[in-house]
Amino acid sequence: MVSISKLVLPILLLLIIFVAFQFKGGESGLFHDKVHMHIFNNLTNGVKLTVHCKDKDHDIGAQTLNFGESYNFVFRPGTVVESTLYFCGFRFNTEFYFFDVYDQKRDDFFVGKDCHWEVHESGPCRLNVLDKPNSIECFPWNP
């Protein structure tokens, strides 16, 4: 029978405990929780909004929304380097705009698992959930 070193056994036990805590509840603590993105058409006078979102590796696709409809997708932010960036193109009234709907450095603390945006003619507004519940922060379109 092979004897296990007195040092190896405690290390293995600690490793098993660490892994068990990381995977508790079916979600891995090694990764950020998934973010559920919700982009609502809040344009006045029934204006239709076409939204097309992507990051450097994933094209979520385009969708046309009537007033009050939403464009939704789910993703998992980066773990080691917080650099996840999702950007969208918005087309309405023959105008075209861009905006970064998820910038991990900007949004990670504010949105948690749900990121809600309302699109207005003047720009997108984020509904803050974590830091100031029920508050809205509006941003200008990207230049």
Image (spheres, helix red, strand yellow):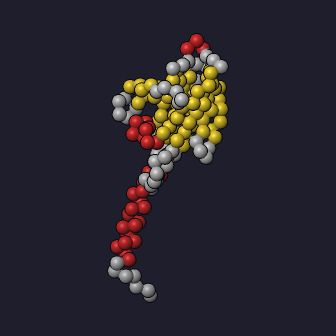
**Residue occupying image coordinates x 48% and y 30%:** 116
Give the quarter of the image for residue 96. Answer: top right
Q: Is 70 placed above or below 83 here?
A: above
Q: Residue at x 58, y 12 (%)?
A: 45
Closer to the camera in the image, 47 or 69: 47
State which quarter of the image contains the C terminus.
top right
**In the depicted structure, whether residue 76 falls above or below residue 12:** above
Residue 54 seen from this side = yes
Image spot of residue 34 (x, y percent)? 50, 44
Residue under the image location 42 percent in, 26 percent down: 137
Q: Nearer the viewer, residue 70 or 139?
A: 139
Residue at the outermost front position: 143
Quarter that holds the N terminus: bottom left
Residue 46 figure quarter: top right
50 versus 130 height, above or below: above
Q: Tell me what residue is drawn at x 38 percent, y 25 percent.
A: 135
Q: Residue furthest top?
A: 45
Where's residue 95, x and y in %? 62, 21
Q: How many marks?
A: 0
The x, y position of residue 118, in whole percent, is 50, 25
Image-based side of 88 in relation to 115, left or right = right
Q: Quadrant of residue 10?
A: bottom left
Choose between 27 and 78: the one closer to the eye: 78
